[in-house]
């Protein structure tokens, strides 16, 4: 069975603005879940990032096998978010969610784990300073002109191969 995760976001995270920095307190967490209560009941993966200067930068990728509300703002995650926020004087902290589709029975945890692994690899390519510890090691292989290969114009064979595997 193919499982298609549903992306939503970016959702703005309210922050407490102190004299020296910004943090996410229990009050801001409550405000967030009051506004987005429906997403809190879902499961899947999430990406914490910052929107600044018209762009988005990922800071941390996580998974929630229980519910987003139970796992997104735990102490461990908040310490990662605060570390990431400390590196940005400006910008809006945001969350993206990739929700497991509503189905009968519990979701397969392996699907969520596979998505998390993929997201970490995609995000570490965009932000080598991603705060995840596991799964950030770059792959040591590639396919010339197709995937993680040399720069420059791909060969005719590489372009044809990309068509064969439906990779744009």
Image (cartoon, rainbow, N blue to C red):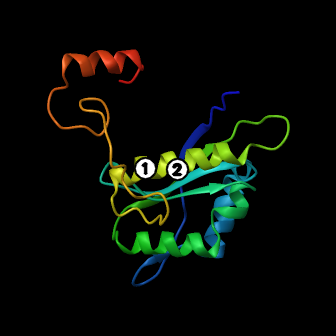
Q: Residue furthest left?
A: 152
Q: Residue at x 42, y 20 (%)?
A: 165
Q: Residue at x 76, y 51 (%)?
A: 41
Residue 47: % across, % down: 52, 53
Q: The C terminus is located in which quarter? A: top left
Q: Is residue 59 left or right of residue 117?
A: left
- The residue beneath circle 1 is 121
Q: Residue furthest right?
A: 105
Marks 2 & 1, CB-CB < 8 Å contact: yes
Q: What SS does tag 1 mark?
A: helix
Whether 156 is drawn above or below 98: the answer is above
Q: What SS does tag 2 mark?
A: helix
**Disc number placed over residue 103 in the picture, else none:** none
Looking at the image, which is closer to me, 9 or 136? 136
Mark 2 Cα-neighbour bin, 10 Å: few <14, some 14–19, many ≥20: some
Looking at the image, which is closer to me, 85 or 5? 5
Q: Residue at x 30, y 29 (%)?
A: 146
Mark 1 Cα-neighbour bin, 10 Å: few <14, some 14–19, many ≥20: many
**Disc number placed over residue 117 in the picture, else none:** 2
Q: Residue at x 41, y 84 (%)?
A: 19
Q: CA distance from mark 2 to mark 1?
A: 6 Å
Whether 42 is drawn above or below 84: the answer is above
User: Can you see residue 87?
Assistant: yes
Q: Is residue 62 left or right of residue 82?
A: right
Q: Residue furthest bottom?
A: 19
Looking at the image, which is closer to me, 66 or 121? 121
Q: The N terminus is located in which quarter? A: top right
Residue 80: % across, % down: 50, 71
Residue 98 quadrant: top right
Residue 77: % across, % down: 57, 69
User: Can you see residue 97?
Assistant: no
Residue 130: % across, % down: 40, 62
């Amino acid at each position: 069975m193919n499982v298609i995760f549903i992306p939503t976001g970016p959702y703005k995270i309210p922050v407490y603005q102190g004299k020296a920095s910004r943090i996410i307190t229990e009050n801001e967490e409550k405000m967030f879940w009051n506004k987005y209560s429906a997403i809190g009941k879902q499961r899947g993966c999430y990406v914490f990032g910052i929107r600044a200067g018209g762009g988005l930068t990922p800071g941390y990728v996580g998974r929630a096998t229980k519910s987003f509300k139970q796992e997104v703002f735990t102490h461990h995650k908040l310490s990662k978010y605060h570390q990431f926020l400390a590196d940005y004087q400006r910008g809006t902290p945001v969350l993206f969610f990739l929700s497991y589709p509503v189905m009968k029975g519990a979701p397969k945890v392996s699907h969520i784990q596979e998505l998390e692994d993929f997201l970490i690899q995609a995000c570490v390519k965009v932000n080598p300073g991603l705060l995840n510890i596991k799964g950030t090691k770059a792959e040591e292989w590639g396919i010339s002109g197709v995937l993680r290969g040399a720069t420059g114009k791909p060969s005719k064979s590489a372009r044809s191969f990309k068509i064969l595997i439906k990779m744009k």
